[in-house]
Image (cartoon, rainbow, N blue to C red):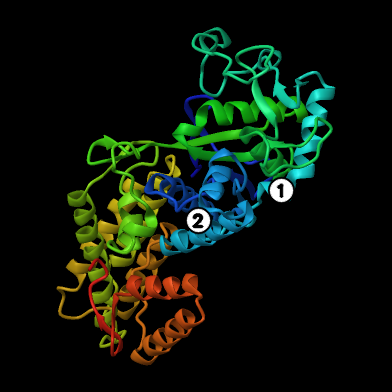
Amino acid sequence: MAIKIFNTLSREKEVFVPMEEGKVKMYVCGPTVYNYIHIGNARPVIVYDTVRRYLQYRGYDVTYVSNFTDVDDKIIKAANELGEEVSTLTERFINAYFEDVTALGCKKADAHPRVMDHMQDIIEFIKVLVDKGYAYESQGDVYYRTRKFNGYGKLSHQSIDDLKVGARIEAGEKKEDALDFALWKAAKPGEISWDSPWGAGRPGWHIECSVMAREHLGDTIDIHAGGQDLTFPHHENEIAQSEAHNDKTFARYWMHNGYINIDNEKMSKSLGNFVLVNDIRKKIDPQVLRFFMLSVHYRHPINFAKDLVDAAATSFERIKTAYANVAHRLTATTDVVPAGDWLTQIAQQQEAFELAMDDDFNTANAISVLFELARLANVYLQEDNTSKEVLEKFLAVLEKLSDVLGLVLVEETLLDEEVEQLIQERIDARKNKDFARSDEIRDLLQAKGIILEDTRQGTRWKRGSLSE
């Protein structure tokens, strides 16, 4: 069996063959950290975490890199509005990002590079592009000569002439051509900046990923991934920068996930339907949110609506209930009953799961396999006598395949004394004005179904549903 990936570059499914046998270099564009992430940001994190998990399941050694953009216009504006340093703001939201994605069952990347930590690398990269004639300085700014790169438009499948239509030079820009884009921006008064051969300034957005991908993964990577909205211009510009600099293919397979709509409307702040993960995971079990995200193929748009999320919760519960019933029966089962053809049926479902995931990581069909395994398990449990071997196999395969999808079938419960210890730690944190830790503990307990009530007599708690 071979894994096939829909490559945005070719617009075809291609057999995945990494550059080095058994090893995969994967880069996923991360967030700009000026606020909590929204569910649109969460989708690629969940999707590509699952891709990574499946590649590892198939035996690949995956090096997974996902960056943080910790300096840009939005960050500077937010820091100014809040009256704090850029680094203080970004550190807070990087920590919030990890809390959110960990709750969603996502593993940390092998590296999470930050722009500020690679400033000299960025400057040196730009210098090479200037020396090669691909970039030029203009009154403290540095721009990339888009027309000089012959392959520009190959990822988004647009011609340079089509792109020219509608391109314009904004006020204050000093470009040779409207299609050129900024690699380095001269600092405005009071802005955070770094010294460079072109004067004080900071990098443009597109150059960051080209540099950090090269520093952590080399000149050519196997898989570059991100949201559909990044295809143009961000990823298109990355290709132009990296291939001009490295004289090599930048990325061999490009993956892009589809958009998220809210109640059939595009998510946007102007429509007031902007959903932050930090808010929604207090109302919805994060595992249900992950299950919902994976219930649709990653390249297709997905509609976030209460009835659809509720249906996902019910479906996920069916799988967990089947697993729990098998585990319960196992405690009272001996090994005297023949297995029959049940082991073969379970193996066939595992193979069906692999076929689904091999086909461009079709998690929707993979989840259907989990349903079928749950159905078979329920049928088997109707028998008066059951085999320990079969029950153990049901549990092992359900666990293994669910883990590939980042789904947990057994909820971790906190003992009463553990809850009391966490509540005391939260009280101490509030006394010490460590409100970040206080909120973190509250969110942790809420994610475990523990409802807190702060009263004059102290903090009370009760166990509730995960979606309460």
User: Looking at the picture, how far across and down is residue 212, in whole percent?
Assistant: 69, 44
Q: Is residue 223 above or below residue 65?
A: above
Q: Are marks 2 and 1 in contact (CB under 8 Å)?
A: no
* Residue annotated with mark 1: 216
Report the disc number at residue 225. Answer: none
Mark 2 → mark 1, Cα distance in angstroms: 20 Å
Return the residue nearer the eye: 454 or 226.
454
Is residue 173 visible to the viewer in this orientation of the structure?
A: yes
Q: Nearer the viewer, mark 2 or mark 1?
A: 1
Crowd class of label 1 (few under 14; some 14 to 19; many from 20; radius 10 Å): some
Q: Measuring 76% from the left and 28% from the top, which residue is drawn there?
A: 245
Quadrant of the frame with the C terminus: bottom left
Residue ranking furthest to the bottom: 417
* Residue annotated with mark 2: 53
Q: Measuring 53% from the left and 41% from the top, which residue is drawn there?
A: 74
The amino acid type of the residue labelled 2 equals: Arg
Work out whether mark 2 precedes mark 1 in sequence or the reverse, and give the earlier one. Answer: 2
Q: Is residue 224 above or below residue 50?
A: above
The amino acid type of the residue labelled 1 equals: His
User: Looking at the picture, how far across and down is residue 132, in whole percent?
Assistant: 82, 21
Q: Measuring 58% from the left and 26% from the top, which residue is drawn there?
A: 236
Is residue 59 visible to the viewer in this orientation of the structure?
A: no
Q: Secondary structure at mark 2?
A: helix
Crowd class of label 2 (few under 14; some 14 to 19; many from 20; radius 10 Å): many
User: Looking at the picture, how far across and down is residue 307, in whole percent?
Assistant: 17, 50
